[in-house]
Image (cartoon, rainbow, N blue to C red):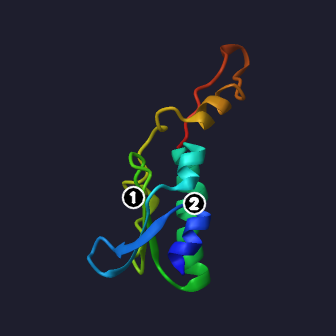
C-alpha cells in the first residue's frame, strides 16, 4: 500500500531496508517535491520535519527521512529515531545549485539604502 500511496504523493518508491539492515525502509526514487521545488529548505522544513513529527505524534511511530540532494532520492526509515536537526547531516548550509526559490526571494528583501540583502535557504 505504501509504495502506491507514496507514488501519488512524492513519486515512485520501493520497499528496502533501513540503514541498520532491518526491514521497514522505503526509498523514494525521484522525489516530486524536491524535483519541483528545487529547494533544500522547502524539502527539509515542509516535508522531512513535518513527516517525522506527524508519524511520531499522530501514529506513535518513529521515522527518519533522509533526502539525497544530489540524486533526489529520499530514504524513509520507519521505526528509526530521527536525529535532532542540529546533529542531522541532511541540514548542510546553503542552497542547491539553481535554486529558483532563492532567486525569487532575492528581489523581495530590501535593506534601506544599502540595497538588496542576501537570501539564505537555511
Where residue 16 appears, as percent x and y from the top left, is 35, 73
Q: Nearer the viewer, residue 52 or 83?
A: 52
Query: Quadrant of residue 15 in the image?
Result: bottom left
Q: Earlier in the sequence, mark 2 or mark 1?
A: 2
Q: What residue lies at 56% left-to-right and 54% top-to-bottom?
A: 32
Q: Residues within 10 Å of mark 1 (few under 14, many from 20)?
A: few
What SS does tag 2 mark? helix
- On the image, the x and y values in percent for residue 76 come to 44, 69
Question: How far is the residue under mark 2 from the one under mark 1?
Answer: 15 Å
- Report the quarter where the N terminus lies: bottom right
Residue 47's label in the rendered image is 2
Is label 1 in a helix, a strand or a loop?
A: loop
Q: Quarter-wise, where is residue 24 in the image?
A: bottom left
Name the foreground residue: 86 vs 99: 99
Crowding around mark 2 (Cα neighbors within 10 Å: few <14, some 14 to 19, many 20+) is: some
Q: Tags 2 and 1 in contact by the CB under 8 Å rule? A: no
User: Residue 91, relative to residue 47: is it above or below?
Assistant: above
In the figure, is residue 68 to the left or right of 107? left
Q: Residue at x 54, y 35 (%)?
A: 99
Q: Position of residue 48 (x, y in %)?
A: 52, 61
Q: Which residue is mark 1?
A: 88
Residue 47 is left or right of residue 74, and the answer is right
Pick the front one: 29 or 43: 29
**Is 101 positioned to the left or the right of 20 in the image?**
right
Q: Position of residue 59 (x, y in %)?
A: 58, 84
Closer to viewer: mark 2 or mark 1: 2
Amino acid at each position: 500500500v505504501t509504495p502506491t500511496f507514496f507514488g501519488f504523493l512524492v513519486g515512485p518508491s520501493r520497499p528496502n531496508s533501513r540503514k541498520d539492515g532491518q526491514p521497514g525502509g522505503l526509498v523514494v526514487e525521484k522525489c516530486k517535491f524536491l524535483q519541483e521545488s528545487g529547494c533544500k529548505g522547502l524539502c527539509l522544513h515542509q516535508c522531512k520535519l513535518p513527516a517525522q513529527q506527524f508519524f511520531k505524534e499522530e501514529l506513535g511511530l518513529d521515522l527518519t527521512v533522509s533526502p539525497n540532494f544530489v540524486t533526489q532520492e529520499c530514504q524513509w526509515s520507519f521505526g528509526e529515531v530521527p536525529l535532532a536537526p542540529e546533529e542531522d547531516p541532511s541540514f548542510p548550509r546553503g542552497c542547491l545549485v539553481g535554486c529558483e526559490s532563492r532567486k525569487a526571494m532575492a528581489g523581495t528583501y530590501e535593506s534601506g539604502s544599502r540595497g538588496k540583502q542576501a537570501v539564505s535557504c537555511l
